[in-house]
Amino acid sequence: MVGARWAERNCDATLPRIAGACNTETPSAGPKCCHTTRCRAMPDFMEVAGESRATILARTISCSPRMPVRLWSKKQSSRNVAVLWTGGKDSALALHEVCAKGRSVPTLVTFAPRRGTFRAHPVRVMRLQAKALGVRHRVFHLGPPYRAAYQRVFRRLLREGITAVATGDIDRIENRTNWVRSIAAPMGLEVLMPLWHRSRTGILRRLRALEFDVVVSYVDTTRLPEDWVGRRLDWSAAKELETAFSSRGVDPAGENGEYHTWVLNAPLFRARLSLERLSIERRPKSCWLRPGRVALASKLPRQRGTKHSSGGRRK
C-alpha cells in the first residue's frame, strides 16, 4: 500500500499521502498511495492466458482446498468492492482477503499524479497483474486540491455500483487519520481494511503460506542494504526482516517505506509475471528495479518452500 519526503525517494512527481490508501507507496504528507501513473483504460473484454475475461471472472478460482475465492459475480452486485491497487504485496493480499470473505471485486483502482511516474510500481507491471487476474484496472490522475479529487473519484465509483473500497493499509503513518476512510466513509462507501493492525510477521507468514511470489522492487538504502532489490520475499527474507532488521527499527512489512514490492504470482492469478533484462536504478538514498520486459507466462507447478526464477537477471 504519500508526501514530499516520500515523493522525492519514490516518484518523479508529488502526490499527497493517503494515510491509509495502500501500503507501501506513500508520499509523506498526504494520501498514502502509489496508485500510479498513466492510464490506458483496460478493455472490458480481455484475453487472459487464452481465456476471455468473461470466462475467467465467472469461474470460481480455488486458492486452497477449503476456501474457494471468486473475484467477480453479477449475483453480488450489491457487494461490489474496488480495491485500491499498487501491485505490491499489501494491496494484493487485501484483494485476496476481501475475495475470501465473499465480496465481489469488479475493478482495481490506482491513483496517480497528473505528471510523473512512481519508481517502485511501474504502471505496466500493474496492467499485467490486472490482466493475470482478469479484472479491470483503472488509473485516475489527481491534482490539488486532493480531497476534492478523491471525492470526485469515489462519487463516480458510487454511481457505477461500487459499494465499498478496500486498501492494503496496515497502520497509521505518522499518526495521521486514515486518508481514504476520512473521505470515503462520509460519502457512504464502506471502507474495508483487511490488514489493519494485523501483526507484521503474521502478514509475511500469510503471504508465504498462500505461496505469493513477491519480489522487492525498491529499497530505502538508509534502512536496508542495496542487495535487497530484486530479492524474493521468501521464508529466509521474511525471517531476516522479523529478527535482524526489526531489532534496528525497520518495519518488517515495509510500512514506513523501507521497501516496496511487486507480486509476480498469487492464488488468484491465472498466469504469472515473467521479468526479463532487469537492471537497477540508483540514487544516493534509494535504488529500484527497472524491468526491460514484463510478460505473462504459464503458472509453474506448485513447489512449496522452493524458489523459482523470474526468467530475468539483474545487471
Image: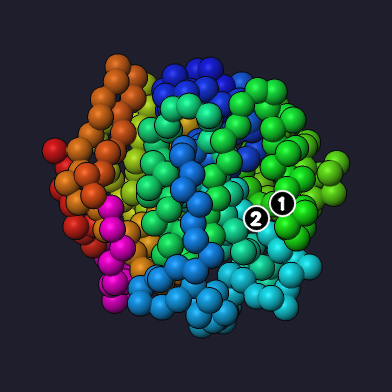
Q: Nearer the viewer, residue 32 or 176?
A: 32
Residue 3 visible in the picture:
yes
* Percent position of residue 314, x then y: 17, 42
Which residue in the protein does label 1 denote? 157
Residue 247 visible in the picture:
no
Q: Say which element carries label 2.
A: strand
Q: Which residues are magenta?
A: 294-307
The reply, left or right, for residue 103 in relation to residue 95 is right
Residue type, numbered disc 2: Ala
Which residue in the protein does label 2 denote? 82
The reply, left or right, for residue 202 in relation to residue 271 is right
Q: Is residue 209 magenta?
A: no
How many residues crowd mark 2 within 10 Å: few (<14), some (14–19), many (20+)?
many
The reply, left or right, for residue 45 in relation to residue 104 is left
Contact (CB < 8 A) between labels 1 and 2?
yes
* Percent position of residue 173, x then y: 62, 30
* Percent position of residue 293, x then y: 23, 49
